[in-house]
Image (cartoon, rainbow, N blue to C red):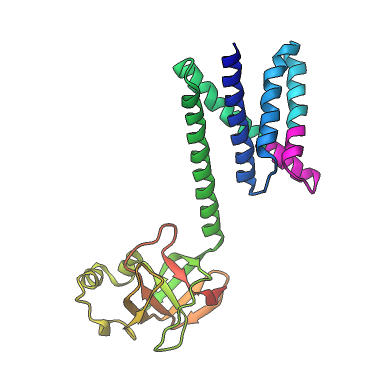
Amino acid sequence: MEIVIEYVLIENLFIDLMIFKTTALVLKIKGRYFFLVSLFASIFALLLPIFHLGSIPSFFVKILFGILLTNLCFKFSTFRSFIKVFLVFIFSTFLYGGVASFITQTFGEVAVLVLLGGVTISYFVTKYIIKFLSKRKLVQNFCYDVELEVGGKRLGCKGFLDTGNLLVDPLTSRPVSIIGLKLFGKIFGEDDMLDLLTKKVDVSKFKLGHYIQLDTVGKGGKVLAFEIDRMFVQGKEVVDCPILALSLKNFSSYEMILNSSFA
């Protein structure tokens, strides 16, 4: 029986640690005493059944204890921030409790390492999802509707405002925005794109066509730069005769990288 208790203590300790780590990860806040608070929570989980409380009293005791744990582990400036942390803590508790329950119900009494391995995988999956959503939200916050005017026709696309894009065309001293290969094909057609890929393109076909050094794309090197008639950026000024440079790749959530001058 002593060995079983030790295993249960280890399992609870690890799961509680993941709960607090996930709470801090989701809210992007710093915690304290993660290990000690998790140990405290694990001992509580072992001792609670001894008191033979009913389901309702047990529920309220767990809620009050959860409030105590979140106060020990995190600092709050307002009551609203406490509610936010506590709700994420409850969500994380259900998440890892559900994972542990699924593993034990599916595989029966599994070894401790198998259970902890499943919880660990769940933590890293959760971490990846949070990182992906944060990056996507960041991109969306800096994405603008852009309209390019070339030869009398207009083409709409999504542009990402990159404050790190400080590229200036050495020929005209104008700021340079970068477009992807797919957008280039939409503007000039598949034939010009094929010529470009086979390095048979005639730069004179493009308005003010020339090559510039572009170290911010891929491994750097010279890329095609050219002028178009006009560019409209949502909520920004209209730019006459902007300079665009071509990246020989496509971007994920947008089709061009706007120059920092639009910030």
Query: In the image, is 174 to the left or to the right of 95?
Result: left
Q: Does the magenta portion include 17?
A: no
Q: Is residue 54 visible?
A: no
In the displayed structure, would residue 219 be above or below residue 253? below
Percent position of residue 168, x then y: 45, 82
Q: Residue at x 49, y 15 (%)?
A: 109
Q: Residue at x 34, y 86 (%)?
A: 208
**Number of residue marks:** 0
Quadrant of the rendering where the N terminus is positioned:
top right
Query: In the image, is 233 to the left or to the right of 35?
Result: left
Query: In the image, is 155 to the left or to the right of 41?
Result: left
Quadrant of the rendering where the C terminus is positioned:
bottom right
Q: Furthest-front residue in view?
A: 2
Q: Main secondary structure of the magenta part?
A: helix
Percent position of residue 2, x then y: 60, 14
In the displayed structure, would residue 119 be above or below residue 224? above
In the displayed structure, would residue 196 be above or below residue 73? below
Question: Can you tell which quarter of the image residue 187 is in?
Answer: bottom left
Residue range (magenta): 68-88
Q: Residue at x 36, y 79 (%)?
A: 213
Percent position of residue 195, x then y: 21, 72
Percent position of residue 18, x then y: 59, 35
Q: Is residue 195 visible?
A: yes
